[in-house]
Structures are given as C-alpha cells and as structure tokens.
Amino acid sequence: MTACLIYLMGASGSGKDSLLQYARDALASDPAVVFAHRYITRPAAAGGENHVALSAQEFAARKAAGLFALDWCSHGLHYAIGVEIDQWLERDICVVVNGSRGYLPQARQRYAQLLPVSIEVAPEVLRARLTARGRENASAIEARLEQHQRLHAVPGDAVQINNDGPLPVAGQQLLTLICQQRRGKPCA
C-alpha cells in the first residue's frame, strides 16, 4: 500500500482536535505517520488545536509564494496545509490533516490518494461543545450549527467515526484506521 493522505473533516466542535491529539500521542514515535499542522489566521492563544498562527498579511504572502498545498476560508479565518506534506507523501509517509468539508472537492483534485474521514456528532452534542469552549457568542454558534447542517452530507467513500461518546472510543477507531493505512503494516 502506498502512502496516503488521511483527510479528517467534521463540524467545528465535533472533536477533531481531540481525536488528532489522541492519535498523535499514540503514534508519536512512529516515523511512518505525520500529523500536519494547519496555518491559521487565528492567534495561537485562542485555544483549540496546535496550529501555526499567521497574520492575514503573512498568510497572503505565503499563499502568493506557493507555500500552501491546500487552503480555504471559513468563518472569517484563513486555513492552510503547507506544501511540506508533498515531501512526506513522496517519502511514503502516511499524512493526517485536519481538513474542511467544504474544501474536500479541491483537495481530492490535488491528491488522488486522499482518504476522507468524517467525524460525526449529534446536533445537541455539537451545540453543547461549542458553548462549552466559549470561543464564539450565541449567534456565531448558531451560524456554525447552520453550516454543519448545510455541509452534513457525507461523501459515500468517507469513513465515518462517531464522536458522541468518550474520547478513547472514537480515538481508537481513528488510530486503527491510521494504522491500517500506514505502509500496509500495523502500527508499532
């Protein structure tokens, strides 16, 4: 099996960051799996995922220089995955990214080996998580819930992981999936 790009997607608040951290911790010493950091025009202190914070000007300059393999906008922020993932894929490394449901068609055009993984949560769980994290006001949370409903259609070939319950349950499912994809060998 060749290297693949595991493209994790789901609503904001679905627990993607927690699942990625769970798998990252479990595979920290595995050189055949890499978790790409996103470049985001959000301050590092905003909480949530471990990302590379860029100003809007820095983001635009890097995009103009061709330093992003994938980039998109959502909720007033710019997101990107760096071109370093191309080098990792060329070295037969399994790359895991935190993607965007809305950007999936463009990502598929660039990466034939992309495996979409949809993190699913019930609407009431999503509302509770968005409220608890305290990053948005009530109207912003409603906008995120509306976007979730609009983008909820899951591609037929996407692997679905339900993350309504305890983190280790969904985390183990993601870990198993990654291990099945990495060079066709089980994880250490």
Image (spheres, rainbow, N blue to C red):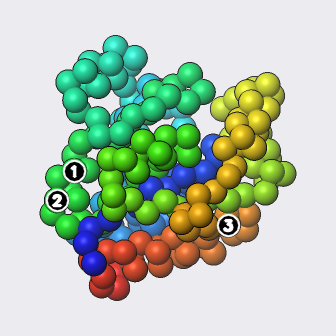
Q: Residues within 10 Å of mark 2 (few under 14, many from 20)?
A: few
Amino acid at circle 1: Asp
Q: Disc 3 vs disc 1: which is toward the camera?
A: 1
Residue positioned 22% across, 59% down in the render = 89
Res. 54 image quadrant: top left
Q: Position of residue 33 (x, y in %)?
A: 30, 66
Against 119, residue 53 (above or below) is above
Residue positioned 55% across, 40% down in the render = 102
Amino acid at circle 2: Glu
Give the CA separation, mark 2 to mark 3: 31 Å
Residue 99's disc number: none
Provide the secondary structure element on which disc 2 rests.
helix
Q: Position of residue 134 (x, y in %)?
A: 70, 35
Residue 86's disc number: 1
Q: Quadrant of the C terminus?
A: bottom left
Amino acid at circle 3: Asn
Q: Residues within 10 Å of mark 1 (few under 14, many from 20)?
A: some
Residue 90's disc number: 2
Report which residue position mark 3 lands on.
162
